[in-house]
Amino acid sequence: MKIALDLRRIKNPGIGRYMRCLTEALLAVAPEHEYLLILPPDCAGVIGVSERGAKVEKVIAAAKYYSVREQFDLPRILRQHRVDLLHSPHFNIPLMCPCPVVATIHDVIYLACPEDLPSVAGRLYYKGMMARAVRRAEKIITVSSYSRNEIRKYLHIEREVEVIHSGVDRCFQPVTDQERIQKIKAAYGIAGEYLLYTGIFKPRKNHRGLLQAFRRFLDLGGGAVLVIAGPLKEGELELRTLAEELKMSHKVVFTGFVDDADLPALYSGANVYACPSLYEGFGLTVLEAMACGTPVVCSSATSLPQVAGAAAHYADARDAVAFGDALYQAFTDLNLRAGLVENGFMNVRRFDWRNTAEQTLAVYQRALGAPAENVVCA
């Protein structure tokens, strides 16, 4: 079987990690197949994936995502390389695809959380692309039972959606080298003990709610700073202003972009990882923190309880007092902390990229043997 993987967004956060880890696991699990990796122009063929002797071809696709040109370029590439199956890890499928397709739809965030994409035209286009994917693809994959239900709800479909959990990159392990941790802390301007949150700035990520909960944490006597890691863009000014209004700007550190290589040490050095998000299709950062041995305080919303299981300390992230109390408990209660760490290590074992790859290969085989199912789309 010759499998094409559309990896044109492999440099993006989140979806890029999914593409990179899945590709590497597929090559390791099933090297007997041939693989065509469709890459963006700015990666020069270097994507940080170990090929391990697998049969791999790489082709650079000049066409941008969601462009008219890709409707012609991708089918040409697939025909030229005689591909048996295309996996689109981000539901973007060419109209005239010459082979069976498997598409991954991670979530329907812009439909469920329209404030994350204020443009009405943008949301209509987004929904149209997803609707086309569920009509055209032989098989649809998503990453959690919660997302499967949301896909059915918002796209009004009556067909099977395969749930295959993402894995956790093996680079996320406890960093015990204190010198390494201190070096990373110094690089990002962190002093002393700290609570950590990583993620882009979107309303659903609930950074404002976290700041308000952290004010409660400080009022209870919590002796730590809050580290907010990730590219916030225009949101940083808003959050800095709120921190000043809450009279705790000196207690909040904004790191900006954090290199992937620094994340394990940043997680490992944190006393608590906080996830106050109000909507997640999966919630990978929670697992990354657990894999590094960090206690997790987590929102009880959407997919997060499915992913974090019994390994997180839950609180309503819309309630700043409740979430702040939970942060303080996880910071100060040694027995609670020890239990969260132990349960976290056990929970992470459920999410292995090798298992993800094996289940994904099984979907490929079914896609080649089965036509697209009848669907109803609104």
Image (cartoon, grey):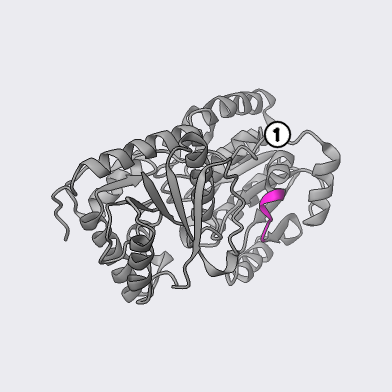
Is residue 132 depicted above or below 196 in this figure?
A: below
Is residue 298 among the parts visible in the rendering? Answer: yes
Would residue 369 appear left or right of 189 to someone viewing this image? left
Q: Which residue is located at x 34 percent, y 35 percent?
A: 362
- The quadrant in which residue 254 appears is bottom right
Q: Main secondary structure of the magenta part?
A: loop
Residue 25 appears at what percent x and percent y? Answer: 51, 39
How many numbered marks does the figure carry?
1
Is residue 103 among the parts visible in the rendering? Answer: no
Is residue 124 depicted above or below 93 in this figure?
A: below
Would residue 202 appear left or right of 132 to someone viewing this image? right
Residue 143 appears at what percent x and percent y? Answer: 39, 43
In the image as oriented, which residue stretches furthest toward the right?
179
Where the N terminus falls, by quadrant?
top left
**Which range is magenta?**
257-261
Magenta span contains residue 175? no
Per the image, the residue denoted by label 1 is 174
Q: Amino acid at mark 1?
A: Pro
Q: Secondary structure at mark 1?
A: loop
Q: Residues within 10 Å of mark 1 (few under 14, many from 20)?
A: some
Would residue 98 appear left or right of 264 to someone viewing this image? left
| Camera-nearest residue between 319 and 148 | 148
- The quadrant in which residue 251 appears is bottom right
Q: Which residue is located at x 50 percent, y 41 percent?
A: 27
Residue 282 appears at what percent x and percent y? Answer: 44, 44
Residue 55 appears at what percent x and percent y? Answer: 50, 45
